[in-house]
């Protein structure tokens, strides 16, 4: 057990805490004294973040450094948050102050308490630790070809034991190997013979999940601009539409067509129409209109390695552009703040429906359902894409298969 006894070790403690914590750098000298004595059971007077010892907290997050102030805190025999006992080699204690890092582990039972035991007694005090929910965004390419390696992306996979050891993963009810596991995803190889007509499902079971998570693959969703030519009737193609053939470059094995833009812009803020398309929605889109926040607009996009996607790409309902309600998409904003570069490979991009098809006059969305879908052109929805590049430079990208897809929920 590693417990601090001498004030001369403070610098070493500071170095260790900085290494193991994601919190801000803290001055470990502040508030510490060399006293290791005790005359009774531990007492807790205040809990704070280590980076701000003046403000009391009652809620902490995983991997956060916290400080506990009180009395008789030195001779620790156990520290427990919820039902998780901490590694005492990482707990630093003196009589009036104790430092620890909330472990990045999901508890078996949530008690919302901190328990400190010493050789002279114990105390339990309220402390709520926020536990992140597992988020699964989907595949890096929903329409990857058979045999391709594709990633499943999300966050906090490690917390929920989604790894090659603890997780049971099946593709269409057949066991499949996962690899390159990390906090934010893992990889699989698309099995040969996977249907191009029906949706396939990847299921994930772990000890931390109440029920298996199901991730759709090649889900057609509700079409906006797809292989169904009815989704681009009377479309205006300022940059043209490419028919996919065996020698098409780039290749697109599961598409019949795609849209391309390849231009150089000599100045900033040059406006260039890419395309407009029209599509109908029928009664199957009732939930989409009622709950647009539960849906993505997805598409597959590709850009050459040397030409990352630059901002801004305008996308949305052309009827509302004059109202300033068309979406100025910065590709980096949907790529963790990093310039989006698919490196010459098709990649699925997910945009919020409430961004792309914004509502007007308090409505959630501008989308509408047709009484006569695929017949009455007065009832279709419009989608426009235009380039409004912030800076001069080259643009080259290809896209296709725009659709509405419901977000993945994990129980």
Image (cartoon, rainbow, N blue to C red):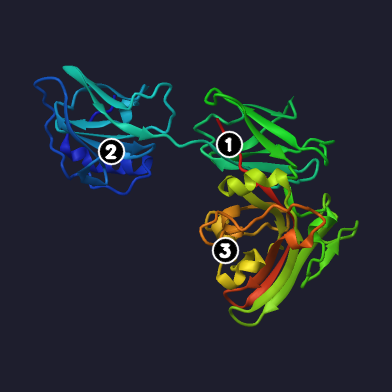
Residue 275 x, y percent position in the rendering = 74, 68
Kindly state the secondary structure of the residue where label 2 is placed. Answer: strand
Q: Are marks 3 and 2 in contact (CB under 8 Å)?
A: no
Residue 166 in view in this figure = no
Can you name the residue that lies furthest to the top here?
A: 120
Residue 160 x, y percent position in the rendering = 52, 30
Residue at coordinates 66% horizontally, 33% vertically from top-left?
178
Rendered-image quadrant of the C terminus = top right
- Location of mark 1 (residue): 409
Cα separation, mark 1 vs mark 3, equals 26 Å
- Location of mark 2 (residue): 66
In this picture, is 2 found above or below 195? above
Q: Residues within 10 Å of mark 2 (few under 14, many from 20)?
A: many
Residue 138 x, y percent position in the rendering = 64, 42
Kindly state the secondary structure of the residue where label 3 is placed. Answer: loop
Rendered-image quadrant of the N terminus = top left
Quick one: label 3 or label 2, which is nearer the N terminus? Answer: 2
Q: Quarter of the image holding residue 21?
A: top left
Cα separation, mark 3 vs mark 2, equals 37 Å
Quick one: label 2 or label 1, which is nearer the N terminus? Answer: 2
Tell me: 265 left or right of 72: right
In this picture, is 224 found above or below 23? below
Q: Quarter of the image holding residue 104?
A: top left
Is residue 127 or residue 25 the one in the foreground? 127
Can you name the residue that lies furthest to the right here?
A: 246
Cα separation, mark 2 vs mark 1, equals 32 Å
Can you name the residue that lies furthest to the bottom here?
A: 266
Residue at coordinates 85% horizontally, 36% vertically from top-left?
193
């Amino acid at each position: 057990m590693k417990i601090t006894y001498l004030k001369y070790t403070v610098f070493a403690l500071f170095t260790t805490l900085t290494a193991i914590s994601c919190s801000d750098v803290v001055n470990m000298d502040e508030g510490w004294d060399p006293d290791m004595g005790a005359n009774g059971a531990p007492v807790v007077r205040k809990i704070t973040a280590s980076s701000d010892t003046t403000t009391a907290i009652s809620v902490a997050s995983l991997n956060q450094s916290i400080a506990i102030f009180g009395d008789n805190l030195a001779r620790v025999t156990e520290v427990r948050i919820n039902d998780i006992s901490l590694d005492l080699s990482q707990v630093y204690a003196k009589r009036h102050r104790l430092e620890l890092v909330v472990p990045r582990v999901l508890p078996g039972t949530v008690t919302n308490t901190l328990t400190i035991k010493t050789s002279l007694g114990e105390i339990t005090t309220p402390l709520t630790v926020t536990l992140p929910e597992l988020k699964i965004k989907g595949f890096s390419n929903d329409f990857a070809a058979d045999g391709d390696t594709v990633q499943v992306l999300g966050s906090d996979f490690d917390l929920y034991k989604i790894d090659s050891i603890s997780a049971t993963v099946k593709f269409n009810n057949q066991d499949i190997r996962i690899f390159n596991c990390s906090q934010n995803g893992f990889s699989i190889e698309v099995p040969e013979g996977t249907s191009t007509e029906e949706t396939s499902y990847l299921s994930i079971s772990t000890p931390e999940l109440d029920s298996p998570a199901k991730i759709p693959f090649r889900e057609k969703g509700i079409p906006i601009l797809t292989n169904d030519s009815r989704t681009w009737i009377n479309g205006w193609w300022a940059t043209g539409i490419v028919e996919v053939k065996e020698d098409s470059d780039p290749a697109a094995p599961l598409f019949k067509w795609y849209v391309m833009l390849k231009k150089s812009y000599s100045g900033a803020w040059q406006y260039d129409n890419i395309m407009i398309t029209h599509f109908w929605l029928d009664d199957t889109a009732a939930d989409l209109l009622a709950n647009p926040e539960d849906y993505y607009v997805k598409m597959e996009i590709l850009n050459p390695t040397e030409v990352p996607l630059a901002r801004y790409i305008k996308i949305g309902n052309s009827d509302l552009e004059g109202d300033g309600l068309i979406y100025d998409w910065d590709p980096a904003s949907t790529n963790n703040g990093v310039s989006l570069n698919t490196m010459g490979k098709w990649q699925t991009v997910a945009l919020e429906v409430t961004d792309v098809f914004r509502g007007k006059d308090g409505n959630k969305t501008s989308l509408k359902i047709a009484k006569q879908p695929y017949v009455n052109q007065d009832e279709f929805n419009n989608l426009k894409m235009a380039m409004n590049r912030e800076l001069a430079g080259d643009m080259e990208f290809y896209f296709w298969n725009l659709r509405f897809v419901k977000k993945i929920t994990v129980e």
